[in-house]
Image: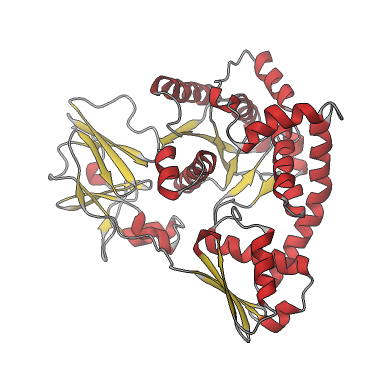
Amino acid sequence: MADVIRDKNLMTPGSRVLVAASGGPDSTALLTALSGLKKTLGIQIIAAHFDHRLRGRKEAAADAAYVRKLARLAGAKVECASGDVRARARRRGESIEEAARVMRYNFLRRTARAVGCSVVTVGHNRNDQAETVLMHIIRGSGLDGIAGMLPRADWPFGRGPALVRPLLDSPRSEIERYCRELGLEPRRDPTNDLLVAMRSRIRHELLPVLREFNPRIENALSRLASSVAPDVASFDGMLEVMFSQDSFAIVEPYSVQFVRNAFRDLPSAWSFGLLKRAFVHLTGSSAGVESVHLQSILKSLKGRQARTSLPSGLIAQASADWITLRVDQPTLAVDLPTKRLRIPGSTLVSTWRFEVEALDRIPDSVARNSLEVCIDADSFTRPLTVRSRRPGDRFRPLGLGGSKKVQDLLIDSKVPREERSAVPLLCDRSGVLWVVGHRLDERAAIKKSTRRALVVRASHI
């Protein structure tokens, strides 16, 4: 793996690397292998585990316990969180698979930012690549779809760390053999065997049929992706240059405008690529946009003025001088309501859940991840509340030795402007105690004199 990482420049010496760890064979092998290569590669690793709440409580708890044990053996810290995937899918009309993917990647992005990781690694393997290519072919994707997953890629939903796949050339059978030889017993998720999602049906129904034509079909599909990927990367680089030129495109947070005359004379492949790039810029993902949508925009060029509705609440409009894609109704992150927390108990605050546990002792583990803190129960004035930041909010970040504006902390943490009002603050009557997911105020920290503690856990729902 070290040679693959070096040859493909997947990570550089000095990198802090977040390893997505579900507990399955792929992530088990990835975390174990990277642990053995830390000194060779000159990297630091941190594990991250996300519970989708799709399994029973016992199974989910066992998954998390396994990852914690594996991380401990690997000499790595571990960050854990959970989210209600079914609730998100119902609320947004998404499939369970898509909702799980978005919530998982949002967790990984937040965690990477909180612990200072510039790279996130995931355990996708050669079999996953074959399934992805087939899925894109079935959906009628272009060259970028046939290229499948890249060993190193940009974040799939908006801005984020680099996404790296060190096992992409490794077959699943080899990964499972590696785990057996090390005496590891990865967790197994029976929901992977359900023929519900398209990927699962491709794995269990389509690929067995294709193996009758080519027993090494996964290798063939992986080679196809690898052969196309350099061309796609080169093409994307040229599109990026065009997309960044003010003389060709005006890019703003909630709209992208192309100069109509320049756009009209482009080959269709270039037009499609630029429109898709605009879609990703405005929505954070290319999921949902298909060639039929892009064709409808190009057809609008034949008329003087036209308006087209697109997925994800986008509008495309052609005028005499411009082709414009914009968000129909921009949805900025709204301020959280100020809400009093139950002590002990669970409290919902918008799309967050806060659980407070009162203890007459100091727990052995003060905090397991960036969404959990342990505070001195006698250091604050009740009630405890959660709210959004307010102008002038300041606190004293633990370890800083001075005060800092909450706004400056979020800027330093590279939280996008439009997301800052959605970052919860845990407060008492005297001010901010915890910028959730970021820093604790020194006033609330556990001290030698602490006798009672509160454990506060935050999670997305």
| Horizontal relation, residue 367 to residue 348: left or right | right
Question: What residue is shown at x 51% (from left), y 45% (from top)?
Answer: 102
| 213 vs 303, nearest the viewer | 303
* Location of residue 239 in the rendering, given as x and y in whole percent from the top left corner: 72, 67
* Location of residue 385 in the rendering, given as x and y in whole percent from the top left corner: 20, 48
| 228 vs 286, nearest the viewer | 286
Q: Residue 449, relative to residue 146: is it above or below?
A: above
Q: Quadrant of the N terminus?
A: top right
* Location of residue 109 in the rendering, given as x and y in whole percent from the top left corner: 50, 47
Q: Quadrant of the C terminus?
A: top left
Question: What residue is shown at x 71% (from left), y 77% (from top)?
Answer: 263
| Horizontal relation, residue 119 to residue 432: left or right | right
Question: What residue is shown at x 73% (from left), y 61% (from top)?
Answer: 236
| 314 vs 244, nearest the viewer | 314
Quadrant position of residue 389: bottom left
The colour style of the image is: secondary structure
* Location of residue 186 in the rendering, given as x and y in whole percent from the top left corner: 57, 20
**Observer able to see residue 9:** no
| Horizontal relation, residue 261 to residue 255: left or right | right
**How many numbered circles are shown?**
0
| Horizontal relation, residue 60 to residue 309: left or right | left
| 291 vs 275, nearest the viewer | 291
**Observer able to see residue 288:** yes
Q: Residue 269, relative to residue 79: is it above or below?
A: below
> Residue lying furthest bottom in this view?
320
